[in-house]
């Protein structure tokens, strides 16, 4: 075995290898009762005493796949290859289930479950005899949930993406996850297709195992897990059913055992530079508006200072290079063949936009990993000199409506600008009449009501959709215009809200408004008919009412008992509502942030009997 950095101190003298934490369970002669108890039950499962006491690292495989989580279900197959890699490298694999988080199946929103899975993972990683862990990631919130948990506990951890589904096809055209829904919805509203064709068209986008094949939140977060240095280079984009996906699973299993010997922990990898790289890569791939929420949450749990304004400072001017739906044309398989994350990173690196010395799980820097990975298909990953769009990142807006919200300005079309322009001399100032909805049910119920008088200059507002209000923050801010406008050819209106938007939607929206109405934000005092002004130059969003009127309305709201939201339906809804932070701060559980690197700071938990 090569000497690891933990074994060789600065003075060059080698020391005994660091004792593995699993030894406190399986090899503690000072407490024979407990050692026997710990051993007998894992021996009963089929691992021999000889193995458990051999000093081999015990590696957890955090299994996020299940029948309830189809996006990640292929991890059940891949885990076999991970196990072989772990065994080959001299470790013992122990697979365990993670609370399922399935984006499209979970009601009222999977947004409620990210922090629950996080909490569960922290307890498992800290409380069981694990020396390292393979985090199986994929469907939107599984990636941040797993990385947040590994950050808090801080034992050696490596992420393994399940990979995207194969490309979807319908009548010779690519159909992409989620994105096809927004398109099919417009086609149905315009009377071009019926219900049966609608379902058939949407289902065509999901032809195989894997996660969403568009640049939605899943592809975004899996790409960013690689940009953060937490996955083996080149692994994020491999489609789920490909043979390469099996191979990278095996190599991931091998590598985590080495990482345990090297004592290479999340805190060694997740440096500020890695987070800044993730912000830049997110712009270049056309990443989801959910990324700031999740990346900021991971940063908070590892103790790196990252705020929402840094998304604009480091990401806004970066151009869009990856031509994937919803911003572009292609899908996951194309992204992989074009070179995936390393090709994007290399292209950005040539422009000096990447912190090349940022560490990664393979022990090399991101610069070393990506320097020679050229773009393989410039239609899918465009060279920096010929981007799909300029300034693909987010603007951060603030004003009397909220303290912060984000907007992807690159999806604002010239036609759209024209419609909302308030001042012919200032192409970045928009104004319109607000129409306000309280939750998606209210919106579905009233959107086609002619008495709302929605026209092509109207701004649609969605409130009651944040971490507290919904609860969990749902992807409901992107709203289609009324049928009568779609028939006139107006396919999108400006949408603003305190909830999220699906990463598969390309709508120009102002999202993640913090604080939300339910947390006392001024969206709660907005009224249908108010004029609202958005100034992209100044980064402002304001209701055009006086400060006195704001104060008066706030007073009235307080007297009425505050903004109303639905009653709790489960214990977790109530618990989370009481302790969750706002979207701009990562929507983390506030008390959890105080727990940092607990495997080091809190040692090994006491015996259980
Ligand atoms: Fe699970 Fe998109 S719904 S990855
Ligand atoms: Mg979604």
Image (cartoon, helix red, strand yellow):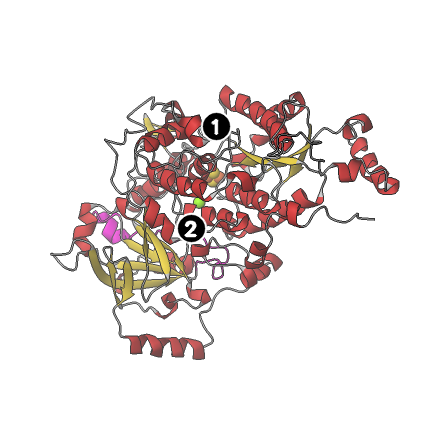
Q: Is residue 393 visible?
A: yes
**Mark 1 surroundings: few (<14), some (14-19) or many (≥20) residues within 10 A:** many
Q: Residue furthest left?
A: 425
Q: Is residue 429 left or right of residue 149?
A: left
Q: Residue at x 69, y 35 (%)?
A: 18
Q: Position of residue 418 (x, y in %)?
A: 16, 52
**On screen, residue 223 above or below 465:** above
Res 220 → quadrant: top left
Q: Quarter holding the N terminus?
A: top right
Magenta region: which residues?
465-491
Q: Is residue 101 visible?
A: no
Inspect the magenta stretch and tell me whether residue 307 lies in it: no
Q: Nearest the camera: 58 or 286?
A: 58
Q: Residue furthest right?
A: 33
Q: Is mark 2 within 8 Å of ligand 2?
A: yes
Q: Which residue is mark 2?
A: 475
Q: Position of residue 27 (x, y in %)?
A: 80, 35
Residue 235's tag is 1
Helix, strand or loop status at disc 1: loop
**On screen, residue 193 above or below 574:** above
Helix, strand or loop status at disc 2: loop
| Marks 2, 1: nearer the viewer | 1
Inspect the magenta stretch and tell me whether residue 475 lies in it: yes
Compare marks 2 and 1 and give the one earlier in the sequence. 1
Q: Residue at x 42, y 50 (%)?
A: 475
């Amino acid at each position: 075995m090569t000497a690891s950095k933990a074994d060789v101190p600065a003075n060059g003298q080698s020391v005994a290898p660091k004792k593995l934490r699993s030894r406190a369970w399986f090899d503690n002669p000072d407490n024979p009762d407990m050692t026997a108890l710990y051993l007998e039950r894992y021996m009963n499962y089929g691992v021999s005493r000889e193995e458990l006491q051999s000093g081999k690292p015990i590696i957890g495989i955090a299994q996020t796949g299940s029948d309830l989580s189809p996006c990640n279900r292929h991890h059940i197959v891949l885990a076999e290859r991970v196990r072989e890699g772990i065994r080959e490298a001299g470790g013992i694999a122990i697979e365990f289930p993670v609370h399922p988080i399935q984006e499209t199946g979970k009601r009222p929103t999977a947004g409620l479950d990210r922090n629950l899975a996080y909490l569960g993972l922290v307890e498992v990683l800290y409380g069981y005899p694990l020396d390292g862990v393979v985090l199986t990631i994929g469907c939107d919130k599984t990636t941040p949930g797993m990385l947040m948990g590994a950050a808090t506990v801080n034992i050696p951890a490596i992420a393994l993406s399940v990979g995207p589904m194969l490309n979807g096809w319908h009548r010779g055209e690519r159909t992409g996850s989620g994105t096809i829904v927004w398109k099919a919805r417009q086609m149905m509203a315009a009377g071009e297709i019926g219900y049966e064709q609608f379902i058939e068209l949407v289902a065509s986008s999901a032809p195989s195992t894997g996660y969403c094949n568009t640049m939605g939140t899943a592809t975004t977060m899996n790409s960013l897990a690689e940009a953060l240095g937490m996955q083996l280079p080149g692994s994020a984009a491999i489609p789920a059913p490909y043979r390469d996906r099996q191979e990278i699973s095996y190599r991931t299993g091998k590598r985590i055992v080495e990482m345990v010997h090297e004592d290479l922990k999340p805190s060694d990898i997740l440096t500020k530079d890695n987070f800044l790289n993730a912000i830049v890569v997110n712009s270049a791939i056309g990443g989801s508006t959910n990324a700031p929420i999740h990346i900021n949450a991971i940063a908070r749990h590892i103790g790196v200072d990252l705020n929402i304004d840094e998304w604009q400072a480091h990401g806004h001017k970066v151009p869009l290079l990856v031509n994937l739906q919803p911003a572009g044309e292609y899908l996951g398989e194309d992204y992989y063949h074009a070179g995936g994350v390393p090709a994007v990173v290399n292209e950005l690196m040539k422009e000096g936009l990447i912190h090349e010395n940022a560490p990664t799980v393979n022990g090399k820097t991101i610069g070393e990993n990506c320097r020679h990975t050229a773009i393989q298909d410039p239609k899918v990953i465009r060279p920096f000199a010929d981007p799909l769009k300029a300034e693909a990142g987010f603007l951060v807006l603030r004003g009397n409506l909220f303290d912060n919200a984000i907007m992807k300005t690159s999806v604002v079309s010239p036609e759209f600008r024209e419609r909302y322009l308030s001042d012919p001399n200032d192409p970045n100032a928009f104004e319109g009449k607000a129409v306000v909805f309280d939750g998606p049910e209210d919106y579905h119920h009233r959107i086609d009501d002619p008495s709302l008088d929605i026209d092509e200059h109207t701004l649609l507002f969605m409130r009651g959709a944040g971490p507290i209000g919904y609860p969990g923050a749902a992807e409901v801010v992107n709203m289609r215009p009324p049928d009568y406008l779609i028939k006139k050819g107006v396919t999108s209106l400006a949408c603003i809200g305190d909830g999220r938007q699906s990463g598969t939607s390309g709508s120009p929206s102002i999202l993640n408004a913090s604080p939300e109405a339910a947390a006392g934000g001024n969206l709660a005092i907005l009224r249908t008919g108010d004029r609202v002004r958005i100034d992209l130059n100044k980064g402002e969003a304001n209701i055009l009412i006086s400060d006195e009127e704001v104060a008066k309305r706030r007073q009235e709201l307080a007297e009425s008992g505050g903004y109303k939201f639905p009653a709790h339906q489960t214990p977790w809804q109530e618990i989370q509502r009481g302790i969750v932070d706002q979207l701009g701060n990562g929507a983390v559980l506030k008390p959890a942030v105080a727990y940092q690197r607990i495997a080091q700071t809190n040692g090994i938990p006491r015996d259980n009997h």
